[in-house]
Amino acid sequence: MNYKDRLRRAAEIILQSKRVFALTGAGISTESGIPDYRSPGTGLWNKTNPLKKASVSALRKDPAEFYKTTITQWRKFSKAQPNVGHNTLKNMEDKGRILGVITQNIDGLHHKAGSNSVLEVHGHLRTARCIKCEGRVLFEDVIKQLDKGINPPRCSICDGYLRPDVVLFEDAMSDDFIKATKVLSGCDLLLVIGTSLQVYPVATLPQLARRLIIINKMPTSYDNKAAVIFHEGIGKVLSDLERTLK
Ligand SMILES: [Zn+2]
């Protein structure tokens, strides 16, 4: 099918469906200047596995080193702004076309775009918590301490060190992940956007939806089960789709 026909078919399916959710991954944020570590060609993924370094054991072993290896990337995340993809999903939620967004991203861009119903299955960078007393602070405080040369950043109450509220390697599954499995049961349609579905357990979520529409540059393991597939750019497809729905 050509691009226009696929848009029309996707719009038809969205209009026929009652419970529609979007599942987003790193691909939706590349247009905001955040590299997708899994895309071939960026080279970043091959050099170091950033997720392995962001593990609970790495944090326990050497928290200062943990921050040194992760903070450059996390600073970028906290400065990034939502793009047309995030904004279109916000509009689709406002119009009742989708019920909410489930995201693998920790960049918080769906929140910044104004989406109300967002499940962040890998956590986010808005807050951090003390590993001793669990007291919460804004992630900005973590950055401020690092800027002053305080590494690892410390809790002002008990002096334990702080960790961001992201799901690290070896962490338990997040509450948002469990909520995602619940909201997706009985889901008519899942829009899979910017994820190659290689990360478990998130990769299991599309099984819960009756139908799939996939928007991703690279092929995914669910392509053969999808009703419509787009390999075009995410911002373009979502805004064209929104126009087709009108
Ligand atoms: Zn504390």
Image: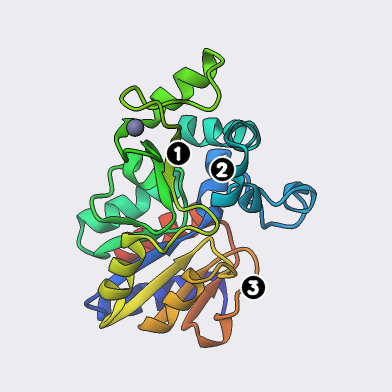
Check disc 1 and report its element: helix, strand or loop: strand
Do the CB atoms of the residues marked 1 and 2 lie less than 8 Å apart? Answer: yes
Give the quadrant of residue 211: bottom left
Amino acid under label 1?
A: Arg
Q: Quadrant of the N terminus?
A: bottom right
Would you say residue 227 is visible in this rendering? yes
From the Cβ of disc 1, is ligand 1 less than 8 Å away?
A: no
| For residue 45, side relative to residue 224 (left or right) | right
Which residue is labeled 1 in the image? 163
Ligand 1, what quadrant? top left
Measured as percent of width and height from the top left, residue 87 is found at 36, 46
The residue depicted at 74 percent of the width and 47 percent of the height is 44
Residue 149 sits above or below residue 195 on the image: above
Q: Nearer the viewer, mark 3 or mark 1?
A: 1
The residue depicted at 44 percent of the width and 40 percent of the height is 164
Measured as percent of width and height from the top left, residue 131 is found at 40, 40
Measured as percent of width and height from the top left, residue 204 is found at 47, 78
Which residue is labeled 3 in the image? 219
Residue toward you, 33 or 227 = 33
Residue at the farthest top position: 148
The residue depicted at 29 percent of the width and 72 percent of the height is 20
Residue toward you, 185 or 214 = 185
Measure the alpha-carbon separation of dots 3 and 1.
35 Å
